Amino acid sequence: MRGGLLLWTRTACLLTWMCWHPDAVSGQDVPWLSEVTQSPADPVLEQSGRIEPLLEADGRVTASLQQWQVARQQLRQKWLKFLGPMPQPPALDVQTLSTKQVGPVSRQLLEYTGEPGLRVQGYLLVPDAAVRLPSGGGLYRKTSGRGGTASDHECLDR
């Protein structure tokens, strides 16, 4: 209860201070703020990815389904041109760093290439059953074995 009250008190104090000192939190004290938040006066559309509204050549708004279908194809082509071709996926280059038997499951710590120049680690759980079983994948944001709390070590102890 005390932690919740402390957090509430700090939040109330911060909000009160912000109300009495609006200039300190308005962003006006950063001289470069307007420079980075304004669109360029004359952007080069081909490089910016910005597209014009769906207007006909004479400036009228696209109004009919047929006009929209034509405009949609043109819009798609512009977008695909801007995105460019998909890069080839990197070779996974999977390396098994460790294997541990955990009950009826073999747990392998793998390292693989996620993006060019970026190595990623993850666990592969393989059941020891002789029959085919369903599988699933799970992404987990925590790194096991880091930090001082017991919950940070949950995958290592099981």
Image: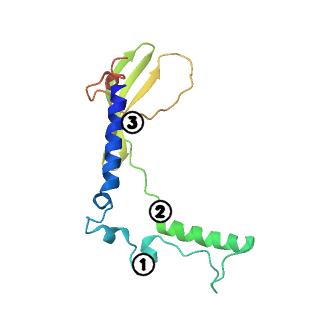
Do the CB atoms of the residues marked 2 and 1 lie less than 8 Å apart? no
Question: How is colour applied across the structure in the image?
Answer: rainbow
In the rendered structure, which amino acid carries the disc numbered 1? Val
Name the one closer to the observer, 128 or 34: 34
Above or below, 101 against 57 in this view is above
Q: Residues within 10 Å of mark 3 (few under 14, many from 20)?
A: few
Dot in front, 2 or 1: 1
**Which quadrant holds residue 22?**
bottom left
Q: Which residue is mark 2?
A: 85
Earlier sequence position, callout 1 versus callout 3: 1
The spot of residue 36 in percent (x, y) is 33, 68
Do the CB atoms of the residues marked 1 and 3 lie less than 8 Å apart? no
In the rendered structure, which amino acid carries the disc numbered 2? Pro
Q: What is the spatial separation of the Cα atoms under label 1 and label 3, in whole angstroms?
A: 39 Å
How many labels sit on residues? 3
Q: Secondary structure at mark 3?
A: loop
Earlier sequence position, callout 3 versus callout 2: 2
Q: Secondary structure at mark 1?
A: loop
In the rendered structure, which amino acid carries the disc numbered 3? Arg
Q: Is residue 17 visible?
A: yes
Above or below, 73 against 94 in this view is below
Name the one closer to the observer, 30 or 116: 30
Q: Secondary structure at mark 2?
A: loop
Residue at (38% x, 76% y) in the render: 40
Q: What is the spatial separation of the Cα atoms under label 3 and label 2, in whole angstroms?
A: 30 Å
Q: Which residue is mark 1?
A: 44
Q: What is the spatial separation of the Cα atoms under label 2 and label 1, in whole angstroms?
A: 21 Å
Q: Quadrant of the C terminus?
A: top left
**Which quadrant holds residue 6?**
top left
Q: Which residue is mark 3?
A: 141
